[in-house]
Image (cartoon, grey):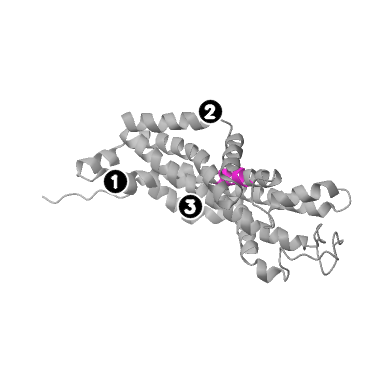
């Protein structure tokens, strides 16, 4: 008697994918958010084509120049082109933010899968680690870790990973607890599939949606954390262009050279706005019907 093959994906996961594929262009939030985020990423990648200046090149004879045809947003205290530094700062901050979300996303999802699927001792250990991390405020713990590890992109990513994985672990764990009792998982077990195959091929596609949606808002918080660290002097070390350090440098001149601090703030606001819309659109498109 032939064995009936077990479907790799539950019907809910298949339905979500079909819904996303056929409706993504109808969601105004998703389209606008994706357009803004894509434009920011393309601008950061094409920085050498957009501006002819070196972001770290100093011109001490042309400091605090007002906006002109040569320098669209003027120059800073070292004669560096402000517009150029904003574009290159986007490259640094966006890359750091995406990596600082990707790493805890992978770690938290893996631990959440193990905790939710196996339960008992594994769940107890993971949840106790979660309790330890969430006992401290996010930004305070990140600041402490960065001060210990030292400033730099690697230190920021590591610090946020150590703190940020707990949210993904709790989301995935809760979803796994529900999904592992459903018929498609029981059928996979009855078919003799390994735990690894059940988790990766059957459970993960059905529990990852909420984590993906949450990651959009998490990137916004991560960008703010990176900017805060740089503003306090513990983030991306100079002379690398960074939105937080640019705001800190331009703050004393807000009445005379307002663009030095204001335009990086607008870039941060635009990034957060685009990611928030993208997250809202994904939540609507990936929600089970």
Any mark on residue 20, and which? 3
Q: Which residues are magenta?
A: 216-223
Q: Circle 2 — which element?
A: loop
Residue at the spot 48% in from the left edge and 44% down from the top edge: 104
Which residue is at the front of the view, 193 or 119?
119
Q: Which SS does the magenta portion mostly show?
A: helix
Mark positioned earlier in the residue sequence (1 or 3) = 3
For residue 21, say whether it is visible: yes
Instruction: Please tell me which of labels 1 and 2 falls first in the chain.
Output: 2
- Distance, label 1 to label 3, CA atoms, is 27 Å
Percent coordinates x, y for residue 258 in the rendering: 84, 51
Mark 2 vs mark 3: which is more N-terminal? 3
Instruction: Please name whichever residue, 238 or 131, is drawn nearer the observer in this view of the structure.
Output: 238
Quarter of the rendering containing residue 137: top right
Mark 1: which secondary structure?
helix
- The image quadrant of residue 206 is top left
Q: Residue furthest right?
A: 256
Give left or right: position of 70 versus 232.
right
- Quarter of image, res 71: bottom right
Residue density around tag 2, few if under 14, some if 14–19, many if 20 or more, within 10 Å: few
The residue beneath circle 2 is: 135
In three-dimensional space, the C-alpha distance between marks 1 and 2, rounded to whole angstroms, equals 32 Å
Disc number at residue 196? 1
């Amino acid at each position: 008697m032939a064995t009936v093959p077990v479907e790799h994906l539950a019907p809910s996961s298949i339905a979500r994918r079909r819904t996303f594929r056929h409706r993504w262009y109808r969601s105004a939030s998703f389209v606008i958010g994706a357009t803004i985020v894509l434009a920011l990423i393309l601008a950061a990648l094409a920085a050498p084509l957009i501006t002819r200046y070196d972001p770290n090149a100093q011109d001490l004879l042309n400091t605090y120049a007002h906006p002109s045809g040569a320098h669209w947003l003027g120059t800073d205290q070292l004669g560096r082109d402000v517009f150029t530094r904003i574009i290159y700062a986007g490259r640094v901050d966006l890359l750091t933010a995406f990596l600082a979300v990707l790493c805890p996303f992978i770690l938290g999802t893996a631990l959440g899968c193990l905790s939710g699927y196996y339960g008992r001792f594994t769940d107890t250990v993971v949840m106790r680690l979660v309790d330890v991390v969430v006992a401290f405020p996010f930004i305070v713990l990140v600041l402490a870790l960065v001060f210990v590890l030292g400033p730099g992109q690697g230190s920021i990513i590591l610090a946020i990973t150590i703190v940020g994985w707990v949210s993904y672990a709790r989301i995935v764990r809760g979803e796994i607890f529900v999904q592992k009792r459903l018929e498609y998982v029981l059928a996979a077990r009855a078919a003799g599939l390994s735990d690894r195959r059940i988790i990766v091929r059957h459970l993960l596609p059905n529990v990852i949606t909420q984590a993906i949606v949450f990651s959009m808002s998490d990137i916004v918080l991560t960008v703010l954390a990176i900017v805060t660290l740089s503003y306090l002097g513990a983030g991306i070390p100079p002379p690398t262009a960074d939105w937080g350090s640019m705001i800190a440098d331009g703050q004393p001149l807000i009445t005379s050279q307002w663009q030095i601090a204001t335009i990086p703030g607008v870039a941060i606001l635009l990034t957060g706005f685009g990611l928030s819309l993208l997250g809202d659109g994904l939540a609507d498109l990936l929600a089970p019907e």
